[in-house]
Image (cartoon, rainbow, N blue to C red):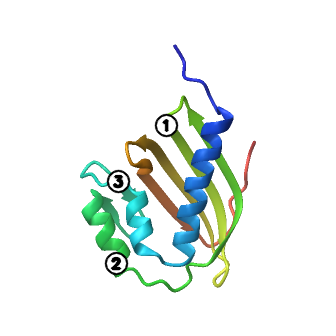
C-alpha cells in the first residue's frame, strides 16, 4: 500500500515547520534550530564544511558557526509529504551578500513533540545550476 502523497493538511503543517526553521536560520536562533532537529544520535546533517552525525554534533556546529552571509532569498521550495508522518522539504536559494547559489534538502518526521528534521544536506555553488522539471 502506497502512502497518500501531499495531503493538504500535512503539507500545511510541514510548510509551517519549514518556515519556522527558515525564520530561525535567518535570525541565527540556535535554540530553535536545535529544537527543530530530532534530538537523536541517528540525526544527520551534511553541511558546507562538515558532516555532523547525531544531534550533539549538529548542535556543536551551530554553536561554532560564523553567522556572516546567512541571509538568503529562497527561489524555489518543494515540500512533499508521504502519509501523515513523513515529508521532504527542498529549496534553492541565493545568498543575499555573496550572491552564491545553494540547495537544501531536509527529511522531516512527525515525532511526539512535533515535526523534526531527521536528515539534512546543504550545498553551495558559485553559480546557478540549470533546473529541469
* Tag 2 secondary structure: helix
Q: Is residue 97 above or below residue 6?
A: below
> Would you name the residue on which mark 2 appears?
63
Q: Nearer the viewer, mark 2 or mark 3?
A: 2
Q: Are marks 2 and 3 in contact (CB under 8 Å)?
A: no
Task: Say which label, 2 or 3, has the lower sequence index.
Answer: 3
Q: State the image quarter where residue 47 is shown.
A: bottom left
Residue, x 55% and y 67% (percent of image)? 124
Residue at the spot 39% in from the left edge and 71% down from the top edge: 31
Residue placed furthest toward the front: 113
Return the x and y of residue 64 as percentages of the image width and height. 34, 80
User: Which residue position is annotated with label 3?
Assistant: 44
- Mark 3 or mark 1: which comes first in sequence? 3
Q: Nearer the viewer, residue 2 or 23?
A: 23
Left or right of 32: which side holds 7? right
* Residue at the disc numbered 1: 86
User: Dot 2: within a 10 Å radius of its alpha carbon, few (fewer than 14), some, or many (20 or more) residues?
Assistant: some
How far is mark 2 from mark 3, CA to CA? 16 Å
Given the current orientation, which residue lies at the most extreme right position?
A: 133
CA–CA distance in space, label 3 to label 1: 16 Å
Residue 8 in percent (x, y) is at 68, 36
Amino acid at each position: 500500500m502506497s502512502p497518500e502523497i501531499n495531503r493538504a493538511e500535512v503539507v500545511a503543517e510541514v510548510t509551517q515547520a519549514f518556515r519556522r526553521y527558515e525564520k530561525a536560520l535567518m535570525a541565527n536562533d540556535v535554540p530553535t534550530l536545535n529544537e527543530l532537529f530530532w534530538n537523536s544520535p541517528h540525526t544527520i546533517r551534511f553541511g558546507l564544511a562538515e558532516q555532523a552525525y547525531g544531534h550533539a554534533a549538529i548542535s556543536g556546529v551551530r554553536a561554532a558557526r560564523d553567522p556572516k552571509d546567512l541571509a538568503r532569498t529562497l527561489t524555489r521550495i518543494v515540500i512533499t509529504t508521504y502519509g501523515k508522518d513523513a515529508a521532504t522539504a527542498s529549496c534553492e536559494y541565493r545568498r543575499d551578500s555573496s550572491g552564491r547559489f545553494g540547495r537544501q534538502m531536509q527529511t522531516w518526521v512527525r515525532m511526539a513533540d512535533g515535526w523534526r528534521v531527521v536528515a539534512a544536506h546543504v550545498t553551495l555553488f558559485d553559480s546557478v545550476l540549470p533546473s529541469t522539471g
